[in-house]
Image (tube, rainbow, N blue to C red):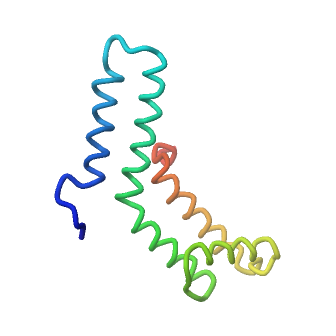
């Protein structure tokens, strides 16, 4: 639940992103510099919009995945640090397939926010 009424933060971001795409980038005469910055802004707004919409569920899934892999719960940052240590020191070598699957899923989740087009290939 959100304290704010509509439009929500993701809806506002979407509206600004669509304005830039349609009205700024779609205009017949836009200086090259403005067009470049509009493209960058559209990308940034899309990332923030997806982070707000998908972030909580992706974070919860990451925590659950890491807890299952490492055998205990904790804060995601702590679990990630432990995973990195285990990869470096070899203590997770016996769980290599599970580690690879977990890391792949983490990368997929990051791409889902950062640039979902990369998941289409």
Q: Please state the horizontal and vertical placement of residue 5, each as a whole percent of the image.
A: 17, 59
Please tell me whether residue 111 is drawn above or below residue 66 in the rendered image. Answer: above
Residue 68 x, y percent position in the rendering:
56, 83
Q: If the image is split into quadrants, where does the N terminus sit?
A: bottom left
Please tell me in which quadrant of the rendered image residue 94 appears: bottom right
Question: As drawn, is 88 to the left or to the right of 14?
Answer: right
User: Could you say where residue 120 lies in the image, as x and y percent from the top left?
Assistant: 47, 45
Give the farthest residue toward the front.
Answer: 3
Tell me what residue is drawn at x 71 percent, y 74 percent. 96
Compared across the picture, whether 96 is left or right of 51 comes to right
Residue 103 screen position, x and y as percent: 62, 65
- In the rendered image, the residue lying farthest to the top is 29
Measuring 56% from the left and 63% from the top, which residue is drawn there?
106
Residue drawn at x 66%, y 67% as measured from the top left: 100
Q: Is residue 53 left or right of residue 88?
A: left
Residue at (62% x, 77% y) in the render: 78
Residue most extreme to the right: 89
Residue at the farthest bottom position = 72
Quarter of image, res 88: bottom right
Q: On the picture, is 93 further left or further right than 17?
A: right
């Amino acid at each position: 639940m959100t304290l704010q009424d509509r439009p929500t933060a993701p809806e506002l971001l979407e509206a600004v992103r669509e304005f830039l795409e349609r009205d700024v980038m779609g205009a017949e005469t836009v200086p090259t510099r403005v067009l470049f910055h509009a493209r960058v802004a559209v990308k940034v707004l899309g990332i923030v919009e997806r982070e707000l919409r998908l972030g909580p569920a992706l974070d919860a899934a990451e925590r659950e995945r890491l807890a299952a892999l490492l055998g205990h719960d904790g804060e995601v940052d702590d679990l990630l640090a432990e995973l990195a240590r285990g990869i470096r020191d070899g203590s997770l070598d016996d769980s290599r397939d599970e580690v690879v699957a977990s890391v792949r899923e983490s990368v997929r989740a990051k791409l889902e926010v950062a640039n979902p087009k990369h998941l289409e290939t």
